[in-house]
């Protein structure tokens, strides 16, 4: 007890040293706790985004895979070549029976596709076609659409000959063909009997005129083939946002809501939505946020996307409404829209509402709408292309990761369609290929010949003709959906087929390593030819990034505490020198070396515990106040790391305890040498001068 | 002044232990800082070297051509005039070349990949391409038609060697794909992360694939003798091009492929020129440098604060011990100000000497690490460092800044104790002398 009292008294009487050591400890502990909390929030956030949505806890795939599996693609950005596994049902049954920790197995297969959702003329022609097919003939609407189509044709003519021809070398023959087609489309005779022969007329416009719009509206769709029901059931955070999930036994697609709202949605509308969310949910202001101001500027410069999509009739009506709304006398829709889109904090909500009630219903709000069918084209690794018409049934998201770019990357497609698009060289495919080759007039060359290693030097030197082939895969926009087969298939069809990889969700993730070993041995025993990796490896570079961040953090903490040891040690040594006489006196009146050591030990202990606790308390305050509100992500990279638009921090008592322990250890190490020196102070120094 | 330095030195030597401990702390922090900033500089250099070999000049005249209000092709027309203007506006340029942008699939019999490709003229670009280290084949073979140059990583994925034939397939408009058979004429060594997304075709071949006219290209790349003048040159090019009658896009420091979406939605048609520099074209990777700088900054602040505190402590106690000495000096006429200076000089000497030693050791370690050509195995680290081997590069200005920062920061900690020393009255101070 006396020792503790003495220790306390010593601490108080050497205030400067105590304060300095204390400040170092406060800084170190604060940095350590906040740093660990921050980094773990990021890495846990990313981990959860992955394991509860895309990767599951484990991933299995073929042992014969040529590349290492990485669900987000490899270093080149392409999907890794992991071969495929023959039969999902077999694998599933065996694994579920023999490995007890497995909660669910979800088959998957990823790929990228390019989708051309059709340009404005395609859309209007489709609308026109629908109108004619309706039971009730809406003459007014048909007229409106015909007028719009006519206006678009005139635009096309101007653009093609003035602009396109400046960069693309169009042969005289092609140029003449284009002119002839445009003349036909503009001719009065063409429009006179339009209603009677609408099918052929629309087909002509669709095949000959629409391709003349050089449109950069391609959607890059990254998709995952799976069993939709199983996917929805196994990932607990899954929920449908719009429409429905793909009905069992049907082909279809479910897009991620984020993809739908960020890439498929009309740009101007999308930005307005984002601004609204920032204002209402994140409590930002337009005045105070450059990001929002930039969005507004982009909207104004891209207002063409609004007025180009309005029919002439609709444009006239909206001019009148905008004039009233903005109290303006301007009659040019372009200028009116630009004024309208120049929003500020005061008028935003009313303009947002106006946009959605008066303008949005008349533009192409979504390039592909829920409930619509659209053509999707992929290229297999063999270079062959495959197309399907697919219906979009709805959109989905993962409840807690709706703003995370990681968790929202994969649009789902049924596994049957995935297999068709995958491009396996089945006998049916080979037949299709040879038909295609005939079409492309590649008489003697089979697809495999094309890729044979050749005595190429000889060939290329002799070749005067460039081996240029143009292939058009228009996949007949909006072909008869029934012919593509909205056939119903059974669950057995789905399960008894190939898959590329599968996510395994565990009942107890803590037993991951043991489960992996079990799967390996089952695979060996039953000759399943699969290999298993954990979520971190499956996430490829992202998984490694998480590890890297943690390593970086712990290195930094190590460095800080390492340097602190020096400083604290120095402070202790200085203190020893100051107390030379004092300690000498204690020894002279009978204090043993043990006593001196104990006293110093308690000094170090009390000091480190007290100040580390202060530092921890400070960090607790910061975490609760700042981290509770959430740290906003300031750009896309930050959003990615934060797994959303805000990073929330949670104070963890275990971290704090760990840091406290570390602080004590650091102080103890720093105090070792000075304490050792202190015990060597001879009692006789009590009589002498201060050293 | 000289006498203060002498006294300071003497005092440091007298208190060897503290000087060593604190000095070591400062040396360690300095070494760490030097190595980290050298790594960051290395990344920056790799980025610049990579981008200016692979897809950008120091300054670029690029742009978009909109054939319709909803399209966006990364094409510039009136090429001859633009090249001539570039020559006139930047007479000091070492090279000016032009390349055609492309994007498509390379399909071998084993695999395929989708990457950006550039159409180049090998003869014209010889001085730039010499930075490519050839693993197999011959770069100049690209001057013949139907050739392709790829990097090692891509050759590995496609499982091809020099002489093998592959098919290049490029999407043009509206689901149309143009394909061409080409032969791999050379495989070059990887240049870190950036080269994963590059390949080279003969310029005429790519023009043919896109059916582009002779007068069109993708970008005019201007290379400068000193890349530090980029900002000034860019400004000149902007005004020069605008004066010549071309429409300019607003400055947007992003790589061109990030601008498609935006440009495709804008209401204009025809040609607009975009003037960019190499940093814009790699700006999506710049977050790595920013991250390193921020982390380094934070770490430095914390460490220097801790070290400063240590110095403050040492000085405090030294002053207490030397109270008698101080009293004597004051009694014989030393002014307060001189006293304060004296007690600032001592930590200043310690920190500046330690910093210099730290800088020298740090530079030696950096040079040593460079000479070892350490290969980075971990792919995440490779992405971060943008290189396959560890590269550290030193910037003289960075060293000066480091020196000033550390010395100043650590010396600042001495101000308060020194000021207190100055306030000691001679009488009281002398009374402590035994």
Image (spheres, grey):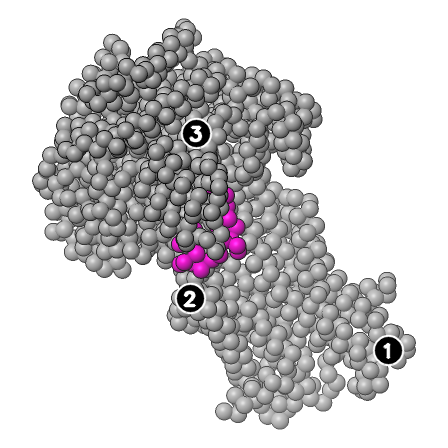
Mark 1 or 3, closer to the camera: 3
Q: Residues within 10 Å of mark 2 (few under 14, many from 20)?
A: some
Q: Marks 1 and 3, Cα distance to the nearest angstrom?
A: 84 Å
Residue underneath mark 1: B330
Mark 2 or 3, closer to the camera: 3
Residue A689 x, y percent position in the rendering: 75, 85
Residue underneath mark 2: A628
Rendered image quadrant of residue B85: top right
- Above or below, comparing residue A64 to residue B149 in the picture: below
In this figure, what is the number of numbered marks? 3
- Above or below, comparing residue A225 to residue A169 in the picture: below
Q: Residue at x 14, y 37 (%)?
A: A497
| Residue B115 seen in render | no
Q: Marks 1 and 2, Cα distance to the nearest angstrom?
A: 56 Å
Residue A360 x, y percent position in the rendering: 34, 43
Q: Front-most of B296 and A151?
A: A151
Judging from the image, mark 3 belongs to the subunit labelled B
Q: Residues within 10 Å of mark 3 (few under 14, many from 20)?
A: many
Same subunit: marks 1 and 2: no
> Where does the C terminus of chain B fall, quadrant-wise?
bottom right
């Amino acid at each position: 007890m006396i020792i503790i009292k003495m220790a306390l008294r010593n601490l108080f009487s050497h205030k400067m040293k105590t304060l300095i050591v204390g400040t170092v400890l406060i800084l170190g502990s604060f940095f350590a706790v906040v740093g660990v909390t921050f980094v773990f929030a990021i890495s846990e956030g990313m981990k959860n985004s992955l394991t509860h949505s895309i990767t599951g806890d484990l991933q299995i795939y073929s042992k014969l895979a040529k590349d290492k599996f990485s669900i987000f693609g490899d270093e080149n950005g392409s999907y890794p070549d992991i071969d495929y596994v023959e039969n999902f049902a077999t694998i599933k049954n065996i694994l579920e029976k023999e490995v007890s920790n497995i909660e669910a197995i979800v088959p998957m297969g990823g790929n990228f596709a390019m989708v051309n959702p059709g340009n404005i003329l395609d859309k209007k022609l489709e609308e026109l076609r629908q109108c004619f097919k309706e039971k009730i003939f809406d003459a007014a609407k048909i007229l409106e659409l015909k007028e719009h189509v006519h206006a678009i044709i005139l635009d096309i003519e101007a653009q093609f000959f003035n602009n396109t021809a400046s960069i693309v070398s169009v042969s005289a023959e092609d140029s003449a063909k284009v002119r002839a087609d445009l003349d036909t489309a503009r001719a009065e005779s063409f429009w006179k009997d339009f209603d009677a022969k609408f099918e052929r007329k629309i087909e002509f416009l669709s095949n000959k005129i629409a391709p003349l719009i050089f449109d950069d509206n391609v959607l890059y769709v990254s998709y995952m083939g799976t069993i939709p029901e199983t996917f929805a059931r196994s990932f607990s955070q899954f929920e449908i946002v719009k429409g429905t999930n793909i009905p069992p036994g049907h082909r279809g697609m479910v897009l991620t809501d984020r993809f739908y709202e960020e890439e498929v949605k009309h740009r101007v509308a999308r930005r307005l939505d984002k601004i609204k969310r920032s204002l209402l949910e994140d409590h930002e202001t337009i005045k105070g946020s450059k990001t929002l101001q930039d969005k507004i500027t982009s909207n104004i410069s891209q207002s063409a996307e609004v007025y180009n999509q309005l029919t002439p009739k609709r444009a006239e009506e909206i001019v009148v409404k905008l004039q009233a709304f903005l109290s303006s006398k301007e009659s040019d829709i372009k200028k009116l829209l630009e004024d309208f889109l120049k929003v500020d904090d005061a008028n935003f909500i009313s303009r947002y509402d106006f946009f959605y009630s008066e303008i949005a219903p008349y533009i192409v709000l979504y390039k592909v709408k829920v409930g619509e069918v659209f053509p999707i084209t992929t290229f297999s690794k063999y270079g062959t292309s495959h197309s399907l018409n697919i219906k979009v049934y709805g959109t989905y998201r993962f409840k807690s990761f709706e703003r995370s770019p990681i968790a929202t990357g994969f649009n789902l497609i049924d596994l049957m369609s995935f297999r068709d698009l995958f491009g396996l060289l089945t006998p049916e495919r080979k037949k299709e290929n040879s038909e295609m080759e005939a079409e492309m007039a590649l008489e003697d060359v089979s697809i495999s010949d094309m890729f044979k290693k050749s005595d190429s030097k000889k060939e290329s030197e002799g070749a005067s003709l460039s081996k240029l082939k143009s292939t058009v895969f228009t996949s007949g926009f909006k072909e008869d959906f029934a012919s593509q087969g909205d056939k119903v298939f059974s669950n057995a069809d789905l399960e008894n087929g190939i898959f590329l990889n599968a996510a395994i969700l565990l009942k107890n993730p803590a037993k991951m390593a043991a489960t992996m070993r079990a799967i390996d041995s089952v695979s060996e025993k039953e000759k399943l030819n699969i290999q298993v990796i954990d979520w971190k490896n499956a996430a490829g570079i992202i998984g490694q990034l998480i590890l890297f961040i943690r390593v970086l953090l712990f290195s930094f903490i190590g460095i800080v505490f390492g340097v602190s040891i020096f400083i604290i040690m120095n402070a202790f040594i200085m203190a020893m020198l100051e107390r030379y006489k004092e300690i000498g006196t204690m020894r002279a009146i009978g204090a043993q070396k043990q006593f001196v050591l104990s006293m110093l030990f308690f000094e170090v202990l009390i000091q480190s515990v007290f100040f580390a606790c202060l530092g921890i308390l400070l960090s607790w305050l910061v975490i609760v106040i700042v981290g509770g509100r959430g740290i906003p992500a300031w750009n896309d990279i930050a959003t990615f790391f934060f797994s959303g638009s805000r990073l929330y921090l949670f104070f963890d008592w275990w971290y704090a305890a760990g840091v406290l322990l570390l602080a004590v250890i650091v102080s103890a190490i720093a105090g070792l040498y000075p304490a050792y020196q202190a015990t060597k102070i001879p009692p006789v120094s009590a009589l002498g001068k201060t050293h | 002044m000289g006498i203060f330095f002498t006294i300071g030195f003497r005092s440091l030597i007298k208190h060897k232990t503290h000087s060593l401990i604190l000095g070591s702390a400062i040396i360690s922090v300095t070494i760490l800082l030097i190595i980290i900033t050298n790594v960051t500089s290395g990344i920056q250099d790799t980025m610049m070297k990579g981008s200016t070999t692979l897809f950008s000049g120091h300054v670029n005249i690029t742009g978009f051509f909109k054939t319709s209000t909803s399209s966006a092709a990364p094409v510039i027309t009136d090429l001859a005039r633009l090249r001539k203007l570039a020559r006139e506006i930047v007479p000091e340029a070492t090279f000016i070349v032009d390349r055609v942008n492309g994007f498509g699939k390379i399909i071998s019999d084993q695999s395929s990949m989708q990457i950006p490709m550039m159409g180049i003229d090998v003869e014209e670009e010889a001085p730039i391409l010499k930075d490519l280290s050839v693993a197999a084949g011959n770069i100049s073979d690209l001057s013949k038609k139907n050739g392709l140059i790829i990097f090692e990583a891509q050759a590995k994925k496609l499982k091809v060697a020099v002489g093998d034939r592959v098919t290049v397939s490029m999407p043009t408009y509206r689901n149309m794909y143009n394909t061409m058979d080409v032969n791999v004429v050379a495989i070059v060594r990887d240049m870190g992360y950036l080269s994963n997304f590059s390949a080279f075709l003969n310029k005429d071949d790519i023009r043919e694939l896109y059916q582009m006219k002779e007068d069109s290209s993708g970008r005019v790349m201007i290379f400068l003798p000193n890349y530090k003048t980029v900002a000034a040159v860019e400004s000149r090019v902007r005004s020069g091009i605008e004066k010549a009658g071309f429409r300019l896009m607003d400055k947007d420091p992003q790589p061109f492929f990030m601008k498609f979406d935006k440009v495709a939605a804008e209401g204009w048609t025809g040609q607009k020129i975009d003037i960019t520099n190499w940093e814009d074209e790699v700006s999506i990777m710049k977050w790595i440098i920013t991250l390193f700088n921020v982390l380094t900054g934070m770490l430095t602040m914390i460490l220097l604060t801790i070290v400063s505190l240590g110095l403050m402590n040492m000085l405090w106690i030294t002053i207490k011990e030397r109270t008698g000495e101080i009293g004597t000096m004051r009694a014989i006429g030393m002014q307060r100000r001189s006293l304060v200076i004296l007690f600032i000089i001592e930590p200043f000497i310690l920190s500046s000497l330690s910093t210099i030693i730290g800088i020298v050791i740090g530079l030696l370690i950096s040079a040593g690490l460079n000479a070892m050509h350490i290969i980075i195995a971990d792919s995440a680290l490779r992405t971060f460092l943008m290189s396959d081997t560890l590269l550290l590069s030193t910037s003289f200005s960075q060293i000066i800044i480091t020196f000033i920062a550390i010395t100043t920061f650590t010396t600042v900690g001495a101000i308060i104790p020194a000021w207190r020393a100055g306030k000691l009255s001679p009488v009281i101070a002398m009374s402590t002398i035994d």
